[in-house]
Image (cartoon, rainbow, N blue to C red):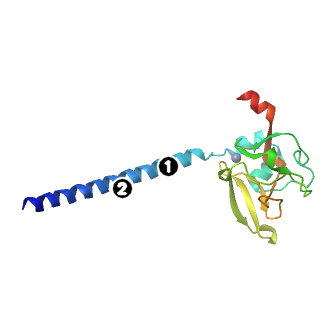
């Protein structure tokens, strides 16, 4: 009898601890969700219209494309960091920038895979992969599979969606 009661008690305790784990797990998920939500920047479109040029606004918020060879970073070869013009998240390094002759700044890779979001884009009768900023959702450009090794990727990014921080300035700030 005693053994039976002990077993019963142990089972109850086991179930309880399972429940606790479940609750804790749920709490954890909620917590992680809250962090993710906090990380996403809410964009005040009116404020943005005042801060950005019409072209920068059109490209980042209305998925526009600047005219080829017109962007200020197309022929830029300085060392530094390219950040999102809207939320200033670092996106690309000058180390992966190369001259693709396509008319827009081209990068062989992202600074970190989590910095951008890739989505299918079928607009304009073509199947392309759209690149957006993972923090604020701004449109950046498209990624193609015709880049040089090692990644073979060509991140074709609008100058209008980027801001450049020279390497020296970065070092001076930190
Ligand atoms: Zn951004």
Image quadrant holding the N terminus, namely bottom left
The image's mark for residue 22 is 2
Residue at screen point 55% across, 49% down: 36
* Residue 169 drawn at (x, y percent): 79, 31
Residue at screen point 77% across, 57% down: 63
Q: How many marks?
A: 2
Q: Residue furthest bottom?
A: 125
* Residue 37 drawn at (x, y percent): 55, 48
Q: Is residue 15 visible?
A: yes
Q: Which residue is mark 1?
A: 32
Residue at screen point 69% across, 60% down: 118
| Vertical relation: 146 (above or below) 48 | below
Q: Indicate left or right for 124 with 35 as reference.
A: right
Looking at mark 2, is its residue's CB closer than 8 Å to ligand 1? no
* Residue 35 drawn at (x, y percent): 53, 46
Corner quadrant of residue 154: bottom right
Image quadrant holding the C terminus, namely top right
Residue closest to the eye, 70 or 55: 70
Residue closest to the eye, 25 or 127: 25
Q: Indicate left or right for 23 with 1 as reference.
A: right
Q: Which secondary structure lies at badge 1?
A: helix
| Vertical relation: 48 (above or below) 152 | above
| Vertical relation: 97 (above or below) 152 | above
């Amino acid at each position: 009898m005693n053994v039976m009661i002990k077993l019963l008690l142990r089972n109850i305790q086991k179930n309880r601890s399972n429940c606790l784990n479940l609750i804790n797990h749920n709490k954890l998920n909620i917590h992680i969700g809250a962090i993710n939500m906090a990380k996403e920047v809410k964009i005040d479109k009116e404020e943005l219209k005042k801060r950005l040029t019409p072209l920068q606004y059109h490209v980042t918020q209305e998925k526009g494309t600047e005219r080829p060879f017109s962007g200020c970073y197309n022929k830029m070869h300085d060392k530094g960091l390219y950040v999102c013009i809207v939320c200033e998240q670092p996106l690309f390094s000058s180390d992966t920038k190369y001259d693709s002759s396509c008319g827009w700044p081209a990068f062989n890779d992202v600074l970190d895979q989590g910095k951008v979001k890739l989505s299918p884009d079928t607009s304009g009768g073509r199947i392309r992969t759209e690149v957006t900023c993972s923090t604020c959702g701004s449109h950046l450009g498209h990624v193609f599979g015709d880049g040089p090794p090692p990644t073979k990727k060509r991140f074709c990014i609008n100058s209008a969606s980027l801001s450049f921080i020279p390497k020296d300035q970065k070092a001076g700030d930190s």
